[in-house]
Image (cartoon, helix red, strand yellow):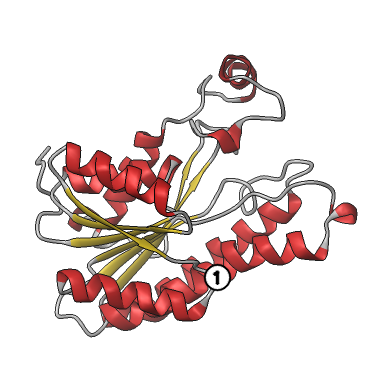
Amino acid sequence: MSQHRFGGRSVLVTGGGSGIGRAIALAFAAEGAKVVVAGRGRAALDETVALVRAGGGTAVAQVADVSRHAEVEALTDAVTERFGSLDVAVNNAGVFQGGPVTELSEADWRQVLDINVTGVLFSMAAQIRRMRDQPGGGAIVNVSSNLGRHRQWPGTTPYAATKAAVTSLTRGAALEHIAEGVRINGVSPGASDTTMSLHGGESEDDRAARMKEESPLGRISTTPEVAAAVLYLASDAAASVVGADLVIDGGVSL
């Protein structure tokens, strides 16, 4: 495979300071993209940038809270001002909020809703406005979850509800804007090799043993496997893929 699939293109990755977001940023940079990683924590973003640069890639960090409209607009402007265009955007920023719905506080609900849903809405709106004015349009990939549209799990209902909303936003926006040259798709990972997939007090070995029982594949997904799916959807090879929801969970939701 060519290592320059995204040569000359600018890519924005929200939630790029760790986990899946970091893997996505590294994967795009390895294939020639100029990457902007965004998130709320400067230190984590700087670590991602350092890893990209250590591999010979190009990346910069931009602190932004996607739940704040003004910060999302400033972030999108910063990408185009720095690199001249916004060719690909990956809306990965998200938080987990679990527990029974009867015990969910108003503050916790508003946080998960603001970041996971409103953040994606604000981000897509800003990105679409930039991309549709570019000669080559652009591609957006939203990171949802297999929880929500594809499956339910006790104690995850608030999070699942927000991720189901992300899938709906993705499909609706894809239909609305493909004629303007903006192609929008989503991925729905299951448990992946991040701290979010660890149950309370669980070690990585414990998780591996649990997934042997829970997953038809017998293991969790790696973050590079999720990143590979994102890069496919953002690439020219997926030029006719519109509004897709690619599930990456080893068959758990089947």
Determine the residue located farthest toward the right in the rendered image. 102
In depth, the one of 42 and 88 nearer the eye is 42
Q: Quadrant of the N terminus?
A: top left
Q: Residue at x 73, y 55 (%)?
A: 158
Residue denoted by label 1? 67
Q: Nearer the viewer, residue 129 or 252?
A: 129
Left or right: residue 169 compared with residue 176:
right
Residue 50 x, y percent position in the rendering: 26, 42
Horizontally, is 169 left or right of 88 in the view?
A: right
From this viewpoint, is residue 216 visible? yes
Where residue 83 sits, quadrant-wise, is: bottom left
| 187 lies above or below 88 | above
Please indicate, yes or no, whether residue 137 appears anywhere in the rendered image.
no
Q: Amino acid at mark 1?
A: Ser
Provide residue 253's location: percent of width, then percent of height: 60, 38
Q: Residue at x 73, y 41 (%)?
A: 153
* Secondary-structure class at tag 1: loop
Instruction: Please state the horizontal and vertical placement of residue 231, each as a whole percent of the image.
Output: 28, 49
Q: Position of residue 19 (x, y in %)?
A: 44, 40
Which corner quadrant holds the C terminus?
Answer: top right
